[in-house]
Amino acid sequence: MLEVQAHQQLKHLLRGEAGQWEHQLTLSRLVGRSLRRQDRTRIQLSAGSSDRWWLALLVPLSLRRDHTVLVLEPTQHQRLLHVERPRLLESGLRLGCWTGFDPPPGDQIWLLTPQQLLDVHRSGQLRSDDHLVIPEAEWLPDRLRRAMTVKIDSHHWEELRAAFPSAGEGLLDLHERLSRQLVAPGGGTNRDLAMPESALTMVCDLLQLLGPTPQPWCQLISMDRASWASWARVNPNTLQWSWQLQPLEPLITLESLFLNHPWTLIHGDGGCRRHGDEPNSDSEELRIDLRDAPRGETLPIYLPRRQPLPNTEIFAGHLLEQSRRLILGRSGLTGVLVDDPCMRQRLCSELAAEFGSRVTLEITAPESNGVICCSWSWWLSHQHLLPEPEQLIAAMLPIASLEDPLTAARVESLKRQGRDWFRTLLLPEALATLIPAIASLRRSGGRLAILDGRVRGRSWGEQVLRALEPWDSLQRLRPD
């Protein structure tokens, strides 16, 4: 059987290697079983397992290559082709990788990005027995949402006017009307601004009168307006704007993709389920938990009981003072995580005035005792390029802002359904970001500081603390 062959090949490949992951052989067998049975399998890994699944996944794929679609981000493509595949070749395992738009002509895996997966699905190029293999599936909704983005710039309006001269005046009037609404008092900033609710309806009504239209306009007509978020990005200098649309829940929009194909999803979100991250299936799926057993050592957390809330006037001063105390005397790397760009820039400047060039803004080559001020998404994307941190300072939890039009639209959709939008959407997604972001602290023995007063001041803070277990409270900061 495929799983037995994968187990033996991987065991031979790992012979003599130190620091092996305890679930490597098990994961390889499970992937082999899913490929052989052509079923739907969801495998849950612990946070921080992003570098562990490569060999366990690729060994069974090298033994069963035909009708297998491996979905990877472009950076993961490069790692596969230049790091992992040569390693397999040295051990006598051949892994043919086909990257074309058409299905592979021979015995190769079909290597696709999320954007390419979307394109071949829409064009009907996927075969019914193509098995989808998707690692890091906890990020799949975000990646598909970006791939499905419909963007309309100024030149698209000009192209539409050129294609339909008789409707030129109506299109120009509609564009000017939307522009006035967007750059009205309070608009014209460099933020994303929600489009007027009537915008999509007005545009679609006009497009239907015109007949067949070029890309990207033709996508608007077939769009389920209640399932898409719509916003504009205004240039404050030129007052020009681009219109962007994204699906609220891409896995629901692409439901047929997962209903009509077998798949193997490997999650690494530490058990914190994101809203809308599970594809619907009309048949039973196999769920397997390969998370590591709880470690004996606890995570030291500095979490003062009385802290101001982020929306108070004194929070910025509190954040600066506490960050100074936490950084003082540290000999290792410190990460200061805050998503608000204005607050991040200000805090970075103030800390640089205190600690000099060791304080940087989102760079991957810090000093040995450097301080990196960054967003949560940047840290998740780049932490594998950095030394393991001595401490992380969570200035604010990664709770999405309702000022973001996409978040606001997703929240509004849940409100219409009568659901608890905070505990259904915002809190689980914040935890799904927090847990993998601090995984390196458990390996390095570092400490976590949480300066967001909501953890102690809100009832849902207990859920955050439970997700961080096991942990131990640091009552005071002691000098080294």
Image (spheres, rainbow, N blue to C red):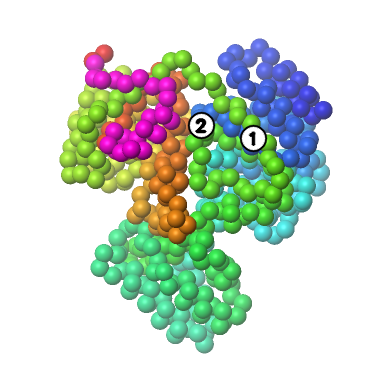
Residue 18 belongs to magenta span: no
| Separation (CA) of disc 2 from disc 1 | 14 Å
Q: Residues within 10 Å of mark 2 (few under 14, many from 20)?
A: many
Query: In terms of depth relative to the viewer, which is nearer, 387 or 219?
Result: 219
Residue drawn at (35%, 49%), measured in percent from left and top? 401
**Quarter where residue 278 is shown:** top right
Q: Position of residue 95 (x, y in %)?
A: 74, 34
**Residue 406 visible, this orientation:** no
| Label 1 residue SS | strand
Residue 62 image point, x, y percent: 75, 32
- At 79% across and 41% down in the image, what residue appears? 66
| Region of the chain picked out in magenta, as a range | 454-478
Q: Residues within 10 Å of mark 1 (few under 14, many from 20)?
A: few
Q: Quadrant of residue 473?
A: top left
Residue 194 image point, x, y percent: 38, 63
Return the mark for residue 287: 1
Residue shown at 22%/34% (left/top)? Answer: 307
Question: Residue 308: which quarter of the image?
Answer: top left
Residue kind at label 2, given as amino acid type: Gly
**Contact check, label 2 and label 1, Cβ < 8 Å:** no
